Amino acid sequence: MNNIKAIDDYLLGSMTTGDTLLFEANMLLNKELVNDMEHQQSTYAVIRQYSRQKIKDEIVAVQKILATAPQHQGFIHRIANLFKKD
Amino acid sequence: MAMNNNRLPTVEQREAFFMALYKKAFPNVARYVAQMGGSLEEAQDIFQDTLVIYYEKVASAQTEIIVNEKAYLLGIAKRLWLQHYKASNKNQPLNDFDTEVVPDEQPATGKILHYLETAGKKCMELLKAYYYDCLPVGDVATLFDYSGTHSATVAKYKCLEKVRETVKQNSLNYADFIE
């Protein structure tokens, strides 16, 4: 599994102090490790973007249920009334 | 709100969670946005982002217990409204609440979908469960039908490697994902 786990532990702060020092020393000597770490950081950003979109889709779905289901019509009316301009 | 140790592993559980929050906190947020001259659509957009931010806080292990959920959600919504207000370049500043800088946590969109096609949906779902929903490995194993925590952990690293390889091949930088 090459360095995936080590980088994961390092970036998420779950490494011991000794291992962290060793890892950082390794980075000074190994450009490939630095590259991999940067790509892994980008990977977490990809995961975050993907996940946020998924959660947002679920929230939008809930909003649709509220807007359309008969049992929520009273609630929706009260909200809509807040925006009526008279 | 009963949060079962902050874990909401299934879509159904999250649906119930978000539904309850809509009922509880959306009227206040909508009233606020209406008072500020916003539209119903703007209130809905603000509240969606509010819930994303709140979900992230609740899911992450570091979150302290939030005593007044309703007030807390309104606070996030106000800050998002302020950001939105600034972004949309309206001409009057808002003076009636604090203007502390909103942390870099507003949900961003776009740029990701292309990569999912190559990375594979199951991997992304698995990684989401670990890193975003912050589920314990046992829950992840159950959710994704792995025989145990060891298999689930191995699968996580394999998926991480697969996505990292995609990122590498496309020479993506961390900055590309920050909007």
Image: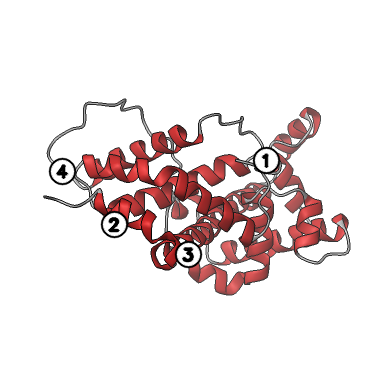
Of the residues shown, which amino acid type is indicated by label 3? Answer: Ala
> Are labels 3 and 2 assigned to the same chain?
no
Q: Residue at x 25, y 52 (%)?
A: A81
Q: Which residue is mark 1?
A: A12
Callouts 4 and 1 in the same chain: no
Numbered mark located on residue B90 in the image = 4
Question: Disc 4 and disc 1: Cα gap in Å?
Answer: 40 Å
Three-letter amino acid code at the position of disc 4: Lys
Label 4 crowd bin: few (<14), some (14–19), many (20+), radius 10 Å: few
| Left or right of residue B27: residue A27 | right
**Quick check: do tags 4 and 2 share a chain?**
yes
Image mark 3: chain: A
Name the residue: 76% across, 48% down: B136
Label 1 to label 3: alpha-carbon separation = 32 Å
Q: Which residue is mark 3?
A: A61
Protein chain holding label 4:
B
| Residue B55: % across, % down | 55, 46
Label 4 or label 2, whichever lies nearer to me, is 2
- Asked if marks 3 and 2 touch (Cβ < 8 Å), the reply is no
Which x, y percent locates residue B21? 49, 47
Question: Where's residue A62, x and y in %?
Answer: 48, 61
User: Along the polypeptide, which appears first: circle 4 or circle 2?
Assistant: 2
Badges 1 and 3: C-beta atoms under 8 Å apart?
no
